[in-house]
Amino acid sequence: MFSHKAHYYFVLDVDKGNQYKVYAKREAYERYQKDSIRTVTVEWSKGVLGYRFISRFWMPKAKNHLGIPEFYQQLRVKKDGTWYSLRVRLRLFKMKPEMRREIAQGLFGVENDDLEQAYRTYLESFEEYFARW
């Protein structure tokens, strides 16, 4: 009987290009992917023969957005025969309708109180679009 356990690791680029492979728990790996964290702090230790190694590493604490809903979508869109990558991330703070209209006008060129609906209207201006992943 064989048991296969998934391993999660990071390849840290430190010391001007030296790369270190550091194993991590699944939660840390998922947080790295979710929060788009690209820097970590490491703690170095010295081995028996004088070689140093990363004994511990940690990521900065993510800012708490107080439960503010977020809308995220990444698409490939086609306009005038050329494909583009479109990435939209909106944090939907509570704000007055006038402010939401201004933001929708500035971002998507659409006057609408609902930012998600303005985004959907904006997508209709493209020839084709599909989810990137």
Image (cartoon, helix red, strand yellow):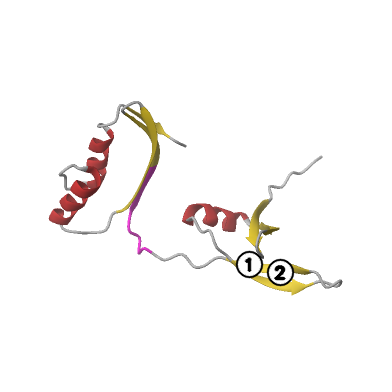
Question: Which numbered circle lies on residue 95?
Answer: none
Residue neighbourhood size for the residue with mark 1, other residues' Cα within 10 Å, grouped as few (<14), some (14–19), many (≥20): few
Q: Residue at x 27, y 58 (%)?
A: 93
Q: Nearer the viewer, residue 58 or 80?
A: 80
- List the single residue furthest toward the left: 98
Mark 1, residue position: 57
Give the secondary structure at mark 1: strand
Magenta highlight range:
65-73
Q: Amino acid at mark 2?
A: Ser
Residue neighbourhood size for the residue with mark 2, other residues' Cα within 10 Å, grouped as few (<14), some (14–19), many (≥20): few
Horizontally, is 99 left or right of 59 in the view?
Answer: left
Give the secondary structure at mark 2: strand
Q: Amino acid at mark 1?
A: Phe
Q: Is residue 54 above or below residue 106?
A: below
Q: Residue at x 80, y 41 (%)?
A: 2
Mark 2, residue position: 55
**Callout 2 touching callout 1 (CB < 8 Å):** no
Q: Residue at x 52, y 52 (%)?
A: 33
